[in-house]
Amino acid sequence: MSESAERRALALFHRVAATVPAYGAFLAEHGVDPGTVKRFDDFTRLPLTDKDNYVRRYPLPERCRGGVVGDMIAVSSGSTGEPTFWPRSADDERVVADRFEQVFRDAFRVHERRTLAVVCFALGTWVGGLYTLSCLRRLAERGLPVTVVAPGGDKGEILRVVPRLAPLFDQVVLLGYPPFLKDVIDTGRAEGVPWPAYRIRLVTAGEVFSEEWRTLVAERAGMDDPVRDTASLYGTADAGVLGNETPLSIEIRRFLAGRPAAARELFGESRLPTLVQYDPAVRFFEERDGTLLFTGDNGVPLIRYHIADEGGVVGHDAMLAFLERHAFRPSVTGPDLPFVYVFGRSHFTVSFYGANVHPENITVGLEQPGVAGHVTGRFVMESVEDGDRDRTLTVTVELSPGLTDAPGLEERIAESISVHLCRLNSEFAHYVPEERRRPRVRLRPAGDPEYFPPGVKHRYTRP
């Protein structure tokens, strides 16, 4: 990590301590005098903030600069449906627009091509759609030939407007959650949409996907070069976009996809995380016990914020040295920026069509009359990818002791979960297409050794 990035993080800490009432109170409660935090070593000993000990404890205005709420607010769904509000400002969007520009300019060559950007994230109070729209319009303000249309998560509207507009442009960029964009492309193919003629590019967010998924979707959309024609963003409702894939990070990830031993050496696990680059001057990452902390100046400035995402940080030079040891030299050059890798919140949630599905959402569906008497309340939820790279929300449920069969129970559970997921989790209700909201339910006997082994701590999710 560069010394300048560390100095910036330290300087931001002092500004936030002086101007954000909640953070000043938080430090006082933990016995921290900001005046004693003079070096970066002091910074690394500051108490962590998180949603429970900071966001939920202090009123919204007190968590904002000068106690003043920003000019726009995004909403994220909590685990019980209680919303969390995240103010934004124009300054926040300018910083995030740099990440979009890096993708659009360096990978998509937008400065050389008239580009139609199609926002397929859900529109409304949720962070994805309107935030993306605002950032893309800033690219146009900077003189890049970008025209934006925002049909949101309405597949029919996307397939209505894109064929009309695409012939007017040199390329079309679809921005949305991975499974939804695949659904759009597959449905369009079935309806005769000539995707290859539109020179499609994809920007995704919200989910980890396989390189096989990237290859398949690129082929179906007629993309010649998945390394330069696609990019994933690492974003959160808490702080907007934190990092983005670059052609360099994608080429590295594709190399590691076929070498699980090397991936395990680098990431600690053989499964592939999202791998992005980030600017440490504006989003400062730290790794702690296999999870990520970040510091950033947002509508709600956050210092050493523990977002509970599993992952880690790899310096730029350290990454290239690792690749050299494995006899791999990328064919593309990239920005001299560090890498952050993200597995997601596998201990707590499953990401499905960009919506975080919380165990508490599923539990409510299992507690309903006609269901509760047949199950123990334990379950495992997964986002399962099939041979066609489509995903299904799958919930494996433990039957009550002694119960081996209950006709119609799977359907009753699936319906109950679907109803209460949509009621409690507004992101799920608005991000996930209606035909995908009903989970696949599988029943297992009590104490099933694969999913519900006795004597060990139960985990409600699987990677």
Image (cartoon, grey):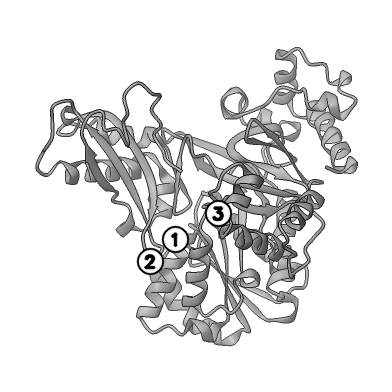
Labelled pair 1, 3 in contact (Cβ < 8 Å): no
Residue that appears at 36% across and 60% down = 386
Left or right, 335 with reference to 416: right
The three-letter code of the residue at mark 3 reads: Gly
Mark on residue 342? none
Are there few (<14), some (14-19), or many (20+) residues within 10 Å of tag 3?
A: many
Question: Residue 200 is drawn in which quadrant?
Answer: bottom right
List the residue tagged with mark 3: 128
Q: Looking at this view, is 334 or 265 the one in front?
A: 265
Mark on residue 388? 2
Residue at disc 1, secondary structure: helix
Residue at disc 3, secondary structure: helix
Whole-angstrom CA distance, mark 2 to mark 3, is 26 Å
Residue that appears at 48% across and 63% down = 152
Query: Eyeballing the image, is 191 above or below 229?
Result: below
Of labels 2 and 1, earlier in sequence is 1
The three-letter code of the residue at mark 1 reads: Pro
> Which image quarter holds the N terminus?
top right
Q: Nearer the viewer, mark 1 or mark 3?
A: 1
Of labels 2 and 3, earlier in sequence is 3
Tell me where residue 98 appears, x and y as whole percent.
75, 59
Whole-angstrom CA distance, mark 2 to mark 1, is 11 Å
Tell me where residue 221 appears, x and y as whole percent.
49, 77
Of labels 1 and 3, earlier in sequence is 3
Residue that appears at 48% across and 52% down = 354
Residue 73 seen in the figure: no
Are there few (<14), some (14-19), or many (20+) residues within 10 Å of tag 1?
A: many
Left or right, 286 with reference to 371: right
Mark on residue 179? 1
